[in-house]
Amino acid sequence: MAELEEKILNTCTLKPLIWWRYIDDIFFIWEHGEESLSNFMKALNEFHSTIKFTSQCSNKKINFLDVNIELSNGRLSTDLFIKSTDTHQYLESSSCHPYHCKKGIPYSQALRVNRICSNVENFDKRCNDLEFWLKKRGYNEKMVRGEVLRARALPRNELLNRPPRVVKDNLLTFNISYYPQFRKLKETLKETHILLTPNEEHKRVFTDVPIVGFKNNKSLKGHLVNSSLKHISLNDGKSQKCNGNRCDVCSLIQETSVFSKYDDTENFDIRKGPLDCSSKYVVYQIECNVCSDSFPYIGSTITKFRTRINNYKSAHKKFRKAFFNGESVKGIQQHKFHKHYCQEDHSGINDWNITLIDQVKGDLIKLREKESFWQHRLDTLSNGLNDKEVPVL
Ligand SMILES: [Zn+2]
Ligand SMILES: [Zn+2]
């Protein structure tokens, strides 16, 4: 852009009095009349085949970025320009941020107002507005007033000619996520600095007390929204038999790439897999072949699915024996599940209809989360055979 504008301005006979650009927004003052201005704009737009300019011009008042510029009696004055759609969403005062960040908001905003507003009346009005909006976001009135006064005390000329920032070399930073209990970290580092300098070599490295730098914690938005799209292959996801010669679980497995809620109100694609009797870290659904409502049960396993189901089978045999002999079944888990298959018209294991519905990559916590997710999504706690929530690890 800089190269382009230089070329354009060099070719024009009539030039603007000033020409200021911020990224791709340009402010310029034209003193040669309206007709020559439209010629100048025409020339600008003919200069490049794809870079085109839109323009707004006025001989009284115009907005540029966050500045409103007014021409009156041959003098320019400036005021803060706020879009009508601005909702003043400053950081909430209750937000878990270091206090100096919150204190910095009224101060930096008042500095901005001080720089932009060329007359005191506008400055006072804008500061009053700022105090009003910050109070609405829960800020302490006294603190806001103090910071605004601090920014006001600085002469505008000095603010407009800011000296370049001096960046110190070799500053050691102790970088840590912010937590409110860390308020005294600076003092602690100062007090314990001596521990970092037990000998000359260390003294050379740790010349100063490290400064504390708080890095951003992951926000709720960060947890909920993933900026990169995961590739989901819908084609490979399915539940299937392993067809192993000696597999005694295949007969119970339903081969499908979709599954439904017990009342058929919702259908879901299986997005992982192919999943079969040998898959690990899977979430599975066991439905009843006999009942029309299917009474689903959701479980998960880190071991091979076949091993898990064989454990279920032996538990069920044990349960049946005790149940029909009128003995105690207390030692056997998943009562609701086993009891269902001991009902009249049911014949136990042969009534199980199993679908492997989901899988995670070797992480027990994630597996439990998925199991819990599907229990709730498929409503298996109130309309199925799960008798308790997935325990939290
Ligand atoms: Zn199998
Ligand atoms: Zn049933």
Image (cartoon, grey):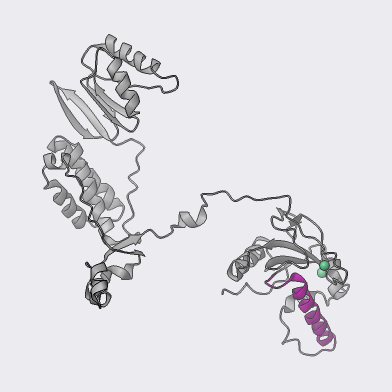
Mostly what secondary structure, the magenta segment? helix
Q: Furthest residue to the front?
A: 201
Query: How far from the left and from the top, in percent, is residue 41?
Result: 33, 16
Query: How far from the left and from the top, in percent, is residue 170?
Result: 26, 59
Magenta region:
301-326
- Between residue 44 and residue 291, name the one nearer to us: 44
Residue 230 seen by the camera: yes
Placement of 316 over or under 113, stated as above or below: below
Quarter that holds the N terminus: top left
Query: How far from the left and from the top, in percent, is residue 298?
Result: 70, 68
Quarter that holds the C terminus: bottom right
Q: Which quadrant of the figure shows ligand 2?
A: bottom right
x 33%, y 61%: residue = 214
x 85%, y 89%: residue = 325
Q: Quadrant of residue 30?
A: top left
Q: Is residue 136 left or right of residue 270?
A: left
Placement of 116 over or under 329, stated as above or below: above
Residue 206 seen by the camera: no
Q: Quadrant of residue 312?
A: bottom right
Q: Is residue 212 magenta?
A: no
**Tally of numbered tags:** 0
